[in-house]
Image (spheres, rainbow, N blue to C red):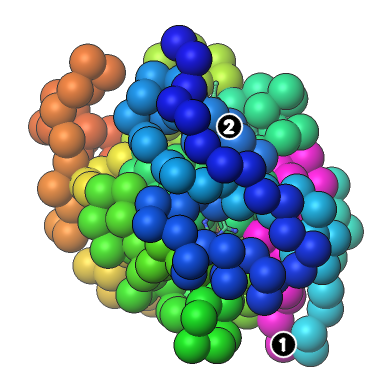
Amino acid sequence: MIPPRFDYVKPGGVAEAVSVLSESEEPKVLAGGQSLMPLLRFRLAYPDVVVDLGGLDELRGVRDEGDALWIGAMTTHYEVVRDPLIAAHAALIAQATGTVADPAVRHRGTIGGSLSHADPAGDLPAVALALDAEFLISGPDGDRAVPAAEFFADYLTTALEPEDVLTGVRVPKLDGWTFHYEKFTRTAQSWAVVGVAAAVRRDNGAVAEARVGLTNMGSTPIRARTVESAVAGVPAQRDALRRAADVADAESAPPSDVNAQADYRRHLSRVLTGRALAAAAGI
Ligand SMILES: Cc1cc2nc3c(=O)[nH]c(=O)nc-3n(C[C@H](O)[C@H](O)[C@H](O)COP(=O)(O)OP(=O)(O)OC[C@H]3O[C@@H](n4cnc5c(N)ncnc54)[C@H](O)[C@@H]3O)c2cc1C
């Protein structure tokens, strides 16, 4: 279908973008367009103005900020997968991003677009939650940082206001931790039926600490804190981790849809969490 009519603005800076967004009644930010363009073409969104961030080079790239990495919102999935700083300090992001869609989508889609869109079936929100990322937002009242635990409010709904721009995310370096993203799909390159983002710190043959984020197990990404507690101190052995993963769905409220019923998703989340923890622990 042909999208509805809208004005198109390509600002020269973040301040100009926020100003245009603030002056509009029904504005929309455009990043890679991989989610927004289908919404427009299906006439599920009727913006009066589309603000294209494509010219804002200051929102691209990855910087080392000491104990954290800054990842610009307009950094594409393709760039994230290949970035050496992400590989060294936040490999979970690169691994999960490598499972997003197909190369064509990964060349256009951005990390900021994926997180702002906040599809609970998207792979990156659960990763951001597991890594305790901070969301850096510019709005009419200035800049603010929102922790991942407060960013994802509901289905496709975040702490972003219509006049806000997500400029980037700050991801704490988890040096000494190891990671795995386990994604269950019906067909190659499709959305997760369920996904599990796991980060593990091993100490002396046991899992000292773990972080677990779940994809497509509720209306938002889920931080699985019950399983994180259950796994702390458990020997880094496959059976022990599988048993600890039996509580992986404690915080979840999974949907039933054409891909899976809720109880099947609960089962999947337990199995996949056991696998993700084992793979992250290197066994
Ligand atoms: C065929 C296909 C398969 C896909 N499969 C997967 C998959 O398996 N896993 C997965 O995780 N994703 C998947 N996606 C989604 C993909 O990751 C998109 O890249 C992502 O959802 C949106 O990123 P984008 O940069 O294209 O954002 P856009 O489509 O441009 O924007 C998405 C939304 O976020 C808002 N937005 C974007 N950037 C900002 C910003 N900086 N500040 C404020 N608001 C912003 C927009 O206004 C819009 O509402 C798939 C997409 C397609 C088309």
- Residue interval drawn in magenta: 67-80
Q: Quadrant of residue 169?
A: bottom right
Mark 1 or mark 2, earlier in chain? 2
Ligand 1 quadrant in view: top right
Q: Up-down: is 153 above or below 94? A: below
Give how far across and how far down residue 27 sits, in percent: 46, 53
What kind of element bears circle 2?
loop
Q: How many marks?
A: 2
Q: Position of residue 113 (x, y in %)?
A: 57, 49
Mark 1 closeness class: few <14, some 14–19, many ≥20 residues within 10 Å: few
Please report the residue visible at 78 percent of the width from the left and 85 percent of the height from the top: 65
- Which residue in the protein does label 2 denote? 34
- Which residue is depicted at the point 22% across and 15% down? 258
Residue 69 is inside the magenta segment: yes
Query: Where 231 falls versus 195 (above or below)?
Result: below
- For the residue marked with disc 2, what is the amino acid? Gln
Q: Is ligand 1 within 8 Å of the beta carbon of the residue shown at mark 2?
A: yes
Residue 151's quadrant in the figure? bottom left
| Secondary structure of the residue carrying numbered label 1 | loop
Residue at 22% from the left image edge and 33% from the top image edge: 265
Residue 234 at x, y = what percent? 38, 68
Front residue of 18/251: it is 18
- In this rendering, does residue 81 appear at all? no
Q: Nearer the viewer, residue 271 or 34?
A: 34
